[in-house]
Amino acid sequence: MAIVNSIFTWYMKKRVHQIELFMKYPHDVQEEWFQKLISSAADTEWGTKYDYRSILSPKQFKERVPIQNYDTLKPFIERMLKGEQNILWSSEIKWFAKSSGTTSDRSKFIPVSEESLQECHFKGGKDLLSIFCNNRPENQILTGKGLVLGGSHQINQLNEDSFYGDLSAVLIKNLPMWAEYYRTPNISIALMDNYEEKMEKMAEATIKENVTNIAGVPTWTIVLAKKVLEMTGKRNLLEVWPNLELYIHGAVNFKPYREQFKELIPCNEMYYLETYNASEGFFGIQDEVNSDELLLMLDYGIYYEFLPIEKLEDENPDTLSLEQVQLNKNYAIIISTNGGLWRYMIGDTVQFTSLSPYRIKITGRTKHFINAFGEEVIIDNAEQAICKACTETGAVFKDYTACPIYFKGEEVGGHEWIIEFDQQPDDFERFVDILDQTLREVNSDYDAKRFKDMALRRPKVHNAPYNTFYNWLKSKGKLGGQHKVPRLANERTYVEEILPMMK
């Protein structure tokens, strides 16, 4: 295994030279991919609609094709789900990555082409290992196995030849045989959808393996780690897996989890590597050891545009290409991909921390949200839930805000709400239950995290005294129609400010 590890490390380091190439010539690489994408889709239904054959430049592309979101592409994707081909992309689409929904849908189904699998998602996976091997040449990662916390996988019943699942499940299902050999647990466990049983089975299957690396969302990694320690009676993960040296994470802010991971893995040499990987594409990798900035990956079959956040509400906003962006300004990301997403706003906002090479940090979402545990609760989810709870308990709400409660010790996470009522609910605890249940109904990711209280517990809701929010806004000098209470926040600042005012 040591020889295999040495050969693999050598091979992976070769890719670093290609990465250095796009770091050196970023605009040329992006222009090349733009031309490839337009050419590949010229004869699709979408390409014909916008006459891709006559588009010669990004400028023409921006003038002709409007900015898209899931709702605008949904009619095309629904036809693809039923098996129609050559709609948004030229090659066969039979896989769809299921992710949390938009304002009008519980779930989104993002088309995944063979090109996006190979040239984007799998290439990103190989690149993060290349970067790790380059930064830590003495690694022994392939002398053992990688523990991968996958999602659940289901067959799309609309068409027996089409499949959907969480992105991680789609990737696991399509892994080459050699990669499967280095992964644990086996696929039947990795893709279970009963998370309580899944954590139990994963712990049983992996405690006797030589696990050298773990990849997964922090939320579920902590749940699994606690199950492993409970089963083995060990104090930390290094007592179970002494050769553990790499943890790959993404999807949520890692900062609130860092101290817990130091307790679970008490080793200063442990390597933490962040990725920026979504259903829509693989966008960034933390390439420097002592920095949490992410290198924007420019040769994955994605053409990038950036929309200044202050222009979000403009009717036909001008976007910027890579060479036009500036440091430390908030941009919404817009992508065109080899999976058939065209000028698609993914909903994330970033700032550039470096322009040579292009490095970014994720600053949030284009709208208020809570995504501390991968639940991606958006304003529309919260509005539906609170309105239904009010209707069924005779309440009228005046204002509210909500934020995460992070993992602490043995306690799982949750959401903390402050709600001020104009008319009180006839049964406050029933109000909370309906709020919680409605969130589960309208958001599949929240529902998954709430399963048996494993990652999210029942919401903690404070019944705020009259004028709480008015007094808070007044204390900040923000009274007036243009100032609104932030409904959702992905950190605790607002709630921590308001709670003392309620005493």
Image (cartoon, rainbow, N blue to C red):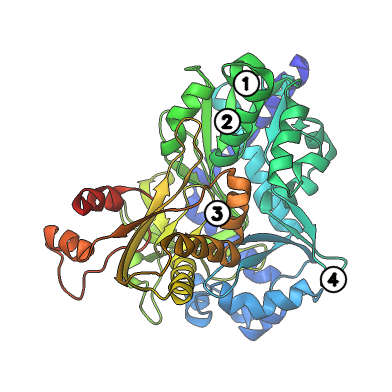
- Name the element at disc 4: loop
Q: Nearer the viewer, residue 33 or 159?
A: 159
- Residue drawn where x is 67% and y is 45% of the image: 123
C-alpha distance separating marks 3 and 1: 36 Å
Badge 4: residue crowd in 10 Å (few <14, some 14–19, many ≥20):
some
Badge 2: residue crowd in 10 Å (few <14, some 14–19, many ≥20):
many
Relative height, residue 106 to residue 244 (above, below): below
The picture places residue 463, in percent across and down from the top left corner, at: 32, 59
Q: Amino acid at mark 4?
A: Asn
Q: Is residue 13 visible?
A: no
Q: Quadrant of the N terminus?
A: top right
Relative height, residue 249 to residue 418 (above, below): above
Residue 29 tag number = 3
Report the residue marked by disc 2. Answer: 247
Report the residue marked by disc 4. Answer: 159
Q: Amino acid at mark 2?
A: Tyr
Numbered disc in front, either 3 or 1? 1
Q: Amino acid at mark 3?
A: Val
